[in-house]
Image (spheres, rainbow, N blue to C red):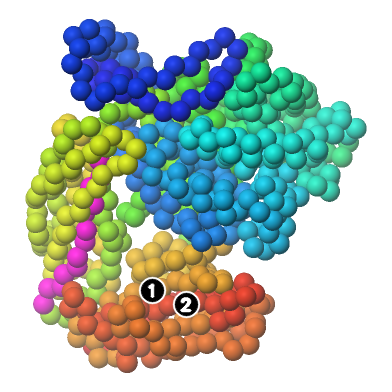
Amino acid sequence: MNPKTHATLILFRSGNVPKKVGSGAVAIRIRLPITLVATGLMALVVALAPVASARADQSRPRTDGSTAVARSRVAADVLMSSYDSDKAWFPSSWWNSAVALQTIGDYMQRTGDRRYLVQLDNTFEKDKGAFPGGVLSGDPLLGNFTSRAIDDSEWWGLTWLQAYDLTGNRKYLDMAVTIANYVHGYWDTSTCGGGVWWNAERTYKNAVTNGLWIRLTAELHNRIDGDRVWLERSREAWSWFAGSGMINASGLVNDGLTDTCSNNGQNVWSYNEGLAIGAGLELWRATRDPHILATVRQLADAAIGADGLVVDGVLTERCDALDQTCDDNAKQFKGIFMRYWTDLADTTHDPRYAAFLDQQAEAIWAKDRDAAGRLGTRWSGASSDDHPNVFDWRTQASALSALIGDVPAWMPRESLAATMSPAQPVIMPAASGASSIAIDLGVSATGFFPLHALASIDVPAGWDVTPRATQLRLQPHGNAFPVSGTIPLKVTVPSLATDGHHRVTASVMAAGLHFSTQADVLVAHTIDFDTGTVDESPWLWDADHSQSNGVQNRFADGSAHFTYRFPFPSDTTSAHLTLTIDAEYLVQASSDGQHWTTVLQECQPVTDGSNKADQTIDLTPYLGTGADGSKPVYLKVSDAFPDDGWGGRVYHVRANIIE
């Protein structure tokens, strides 16, 4: 990183800090004008540069800060595309939604981007009431983001503390206090000498609930002037946790305790290890007790040690094995670990911890990312036919935490990012004549000065693109709201293009910044894919709020739906589509994606999958006229009985096309 540039980053750093950052610590907020004219101030820039640059070079060996910011922005935008603004959550998971929103809070705090504060407040205002079971959580919600699931309640407490740090709005801090008071009712010394119960039924004392409790109480202390109550509760909880036996002889945290209060030997999940690290760090900030920090380091070193949680340098959950599939909970565990590992690297300035952060971010970006910017559950990118790498909003939030951690604590002044839309287009060439497809190249930037971005486009041999090179001028106004622009592209595909995936690559450069993005164009003469897999993605025109609970299925409950687009060749005369489908489905067809005709419907309330069968639909009447010369058909699947939550579920799609 250029020393002068990095020093400028320090001077322009601005944002909210906790009202209290711990005993003996001093927090300083500096706001400076954009134009630096004072000679003395410029001298300060030069003086600070070598120190700042040396620290940056030591802690971020491969990815420069501007690129790390851009990667995080692209990934955060993909995550927020799954946010349901009506229900104010991420569909079908309550505690996971809290973690995803906290991750977005981490992103905003780390990068200065403030675009998603509205969504945080939307969730706070819409979801703070009481809800019956099945609306937002399987459990009834008791109000103020509490429920019988004590750990779920704690996740929301941490989320609102993050919102408080970002905004300074007292209502978020007050909500966190309300949640913590509720949780404290489940601290119980009569069983195992202490600890918070996992659930309202008081059946289990485990690592996640108590790691969360220590972090939550310590964060409250570090934000409430004059507090002693939350500090003492945090100290007591840490002392109990450290001596509970949940930390095994290898320095790894097992899941919880048996009924006889001994280590139950259950799996070492990454989030339990990460929460133990994060809990100790926050309490250390409150106390400066060196013994706490020493324990934190032991936990961290065990996690990345020979018997820890790393395979070939990449953080790996046990369920990441190629003969397993992580459930919806475990999909987010590694991201929680990385959130608190980032805290560890920032707090200790240990280059080993910073290097591990960079290693995870590099692995994810290079191996675990598709053309649409989606990040999968296996950061190594590994996949298998029976247990493919899964991509959804939970895996996106998890991997995003690693990308955020790779952003330098002193944020770069400028960044440049690019995306393509659609990122995974499909083209079905006619027997003769070239076909074309429209792709929009989007460019976004932050900073304080105009940027003249030069974009160059590469296509496979024999293909063409217009324009092949062009310029775009962007005028950013800081980091809070990145500016963006769009460059329309026309990609021409020859009729003899082979079936399969072909990459269109765009490289964007401006003021020493560089970012590349790709579109993964699928050339196909047939349609035959399992839903819920990577093979489905190019055909999925609008996922809306549908879900895939694993592989080989996609379903739409309530008001949700999902729509496929099939761009049949221009010389198609008829087409029939077969869906393997069950539950309470409503299937509609359209030639333009706007006007719909019902072509298939289940008229009985079937909730057990007993009507699963192959259903064939004649799409010939719906062959449209596309701007690219194709004959597209849109097929939408939704819920015939939207009140009971068993909407249409599709497993497999295949077509018979006559040209």
Q: Is residue 316 above or below residue 408?
A: below
Q: Is residue 659 above or below residue 443?
A: below
Q: Is residue 250 above or below residue 182?
A: above
Q: Which residue is mark 2?
A: 637
Q: Can residue 655 be seen from the camera position used here?
A: yes
Q: Main secondary structure of the magenta part?
A: strand
Three-letter code, disc 2: Val
Instruction: Name the spot of residue 182 as percent of width and height, x first.
Output: 75, 40
Q: Which residue is mark 1?
A: 564
The residue carrying pointer 2 sits among few (fewer than 14), some (14 to 19) or many (20 or more) residues within 10 Å by Cα, namely many
- Any magenta on residue 435? yes
Q: Can residue 250 be seen from the camera position used here?
A: no
Magenta-drawn segment: 433-445
Q: Quadrant of residue 113?
A: top left
Q: Which disc is residue 514 wearing?
A: none
The residue carrying pointer 1 sits among few (fewer than 14), some (14 to 19) or many (20 or more) residues within 10 Å by Cα, namely many
Three-letter code, disc 1: Tyr
- The answer to whether residue 165 is left or right of residue 243 is left
Instruction: Name the spot of residue 480 as percent of width and height, x first.
Output: 34, 38
Q: Quadrant of the C terminus?
A: bottom left
